[in-house]
Amino acid sequence: MTATYDAVVIGAGPNGLVAANHLIDRGWSVLVLEAQPDVGGAVRSDRELHPDYVHDTFSAFYPLAAGSPTIRSFHLEEHGLRWVHSPAVLGHCLPSGEWATLHRDRTVTAALMDAQHPGDGDAWLRLCDMWDTIGDQVVGALLTPFPPLRPALGALAKLPRVGGLEFVREMLTPVVDIGRHRFGGFAPRILLAGNAGHSDIPLGAPGSGLMGLLLTMLGQTVGYPVPEGGAGMLTQAMASRVRSLGGDIRCDAEVVRIEVERGRAVAVRTRDGERYAATHAVVADVAAPHLYGGLVAADDLPAGTMRKMESFELDPGTVKVDWALDGPVPWKSEPPHAPGTFHVADSVEQMSEALHHVNSRTVPARPFMLAGQMTTTDPTRSPAGTESLWAYTHVPQDVARDLGEDPVTGRWDREECERFADRMQARIEELAPGFGSKVVARRVLGPHEMQARNANLIGGALNGGTSQLHQELVFRPVPGLGRSETPVKGLYLGSASAHPGGGVHGACGMNAARAAVAHRRVRRVVRGR
């Protein structure tokens, strides 16, 4: 007998769980199906490296979640979530030993910048004031379906207070130019550029400025919090809320097909042969290449959709290294305030060069790295006096060449991943002599391991597709409306492959759920006539 629900959600990552929560809040019966043994998607934690150390398997810090009206609206603190913060949000140590530091207190950040270059402190505070005025509208415009009419109207009302068209121009300016125009010292410029480097937009390209400002200003306003006890506590809280409201979550239940009848999604089938009917909606927290021509047969899709998907571009792959350290990172010069997140690059120029190499199918000799001191941020992650640490860097999906002395070919088998991890570890050793002697255990997750642990991370791509402008807004995942609706009625794309893309903000899942609710309402009105 087929079980029937108002909605079936495929995938229990943050977007799938956001969609499930919203639909349940609207009175729908909801089933969530997850292929992995537990919920979480790319928001999970584990102790597999060392039983005394908690490591976040994929993502770790959550400024977008803390700033997301969607996630805040669920009051996940009532389901066990507790946010904690490091002494400083972000640090960047140069080879010289100088630090650029983003502190949650903007006056502390400004004072540190001013000490390095007089005048930069006041310039930083002016930037923060601008964000205070219009930042909420910018975030709202980014996280709502396209076109974002309500946030756009709010932004238009405040635009004269932040410089009018000059503000719009700056949002479209490459991050390297924003830093150069506004500041004279290295600290604000490298902090902005490093945050822009979280995406795959070249630092000299339009769009990088908006990304850099967004993440930096979120760090300055809401911080880079982490869930106490591990990243998985965030998605566990989401799942707890679903279950407490009557929703059903089933793990080890891989969906292999979405049934389509007369152009409408009506049911899903799992690998073990179970069939679950969906009366009103199927929400797919699934990477677009796995959905179109995968879960949905090509014969059930317009030929144009399949043709457009041929040009769908993934974002770069990822190599992530986790370390269990028997003591703190032995920085050659101590930071003024201990950062939770730190970036590794010799300069803005070297960072830009490394990211350019990745985009040109080249593995950098000196990769730009993002890293996290988790015990510094959350003391529950490992025994007192130790550190749970990670770092990751992006690599090309298709490697043409490697500039390193011990080249990798792009096979990313165990031997190549370990050799590349040595390169990454050497980068930290330069800034923290003796780092290697602190290592109790090390784990390397290459592109293949990442995809095996989460099918949405194709080749280690973290953002569901490139963040560059040609695949954002109305072009995501293919040219169209930039919304969660698909060519199949009742089927909604609720993953990072949909607008607005990667990041733990829940907007992709919420947009899909809201579209499903709106379409059900329209169908009721039509039938009533």
Image (spheres, rainbow, N blue to C red):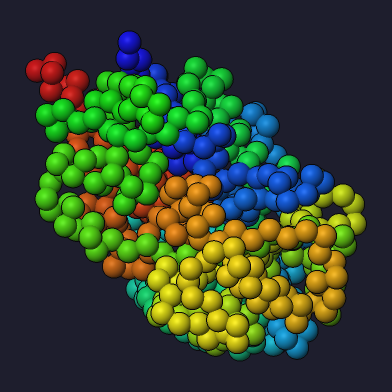
What is the quadrant of the C terminus in the image? top left
Q: What residue appears at the point 18 percent right and 52 percent down from the top-left corner? A: 306
Give residue 250's position: percent from left, percent from top: 49, 26
Task: Check the image and report above or below for 473 versus 487.
Answer: below
- Give the side of residue 175 with respect to residue 84, left or right: left
Give residue 256's position: percent from left, percent from top: 34, 35
Give residue 230's position: percent from left, percent from top: 69, 44
Give residue 189's position: percent from left, percent from top: 58, 81
Q: Residue furthest top?
A: 1
Task: Check the image and report above or below for 350 versus 307.
Answer: below
The answer to whether any part of residue 481 appears in the image is yes
The answer to whether any part of residue 221 appears in the image is no
Q: What residue appears at the point 65 percent right and 50 percent down from the top-left corner? A: 56
What is the quadrant of the N terminus in the image? top left
- Give the side of residue 81 with respect to residue 487, left or right: right
Residue 466 lies in quadrant? bottom left
